[in-house]
Amino acid sequence: MGKEIERKYIVNELFDTALATESHHIIQGYLSVTPESTVRVRIIDDKAYLTVKSKNKGATRNEWEYPLPVKDATEMLDECSVTNIIDKTRYIVNRWEVDIFHRSLEGLRLAEIELTSENEAFETPVFIGKEVTADPRYYNSVLSDKGKPE
């Protein structure tokens, strides 16, 4: 079991994709969403994963991730997803992952940074806006079900 410690922020208008050293196309959906856990299928470019995440405790939660054949992941998303499909492009800027959402979430831009502890200090780039780590409206599982927050 791995631990995921991350903080999430809204990305402001100062973000430029030219800052990124790499980018990835991501399609994902959820097979199960409960207050205690989520089960996600994600396709990143030409790889696929099944991920189980526990309930957040602050910025920390347990995470289990397993590789899947892309064909199986596509079938699971088509046949078993209990939420809308998320389509986004992820840009890597140093330690930051910046997600630019497409389709029904067009216009939403979020950034995450993974940490080694909840109290780890880190530099905040100019494109980082309001922190939304503790706001469940910005969890991908909620976004895929409820859409963009007001």
Image (cartoon, rainbow, N blue to C red):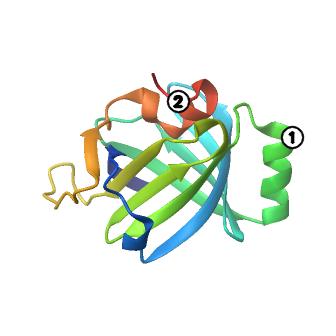
On residue 79, the disc is 1
- x and y percent of residue 146 in the render? 59, 24
- x and y percent of residue 37 in the render? 53, 34
Q: Is residue 25 left or right of residue 99?
A: right
Q: Report how far apart the C-alphas of labels 2 and 1 lie in the structure.
A: 24 Å
Question: Disc 2 or 1, which lies upstream in sequence?
Answer: 1
Q: Residue at x 48, y 53 (%)?
A: 99
Q: Are marks 2 and 1 in contact (CB under 8 Å)?
A: no
Circle 2 — which element?
loop
**Along the line of sight, the residue nearer the viewer: 148 or 44:** 148
**Residue 1 seen:** no
Q: Which residue is mark 2?
A: 148
- x and y percent of residue 104 in the render? 65, 36
> Which quadrant of the rendered structure holds the C terminus?
top left
- Image height of 10 relative to 5, above or below: above
Q: Residue at x 31, y 32 (%)?
A: 134
Q: Residue at x 26, y 38 (%)?
A: 130
Amino acid type, residue under disc 2 in the picture: Lys
Pointer 1 local density, CA inside 10 Å: few below 14, some 14–19, many at least 20: few
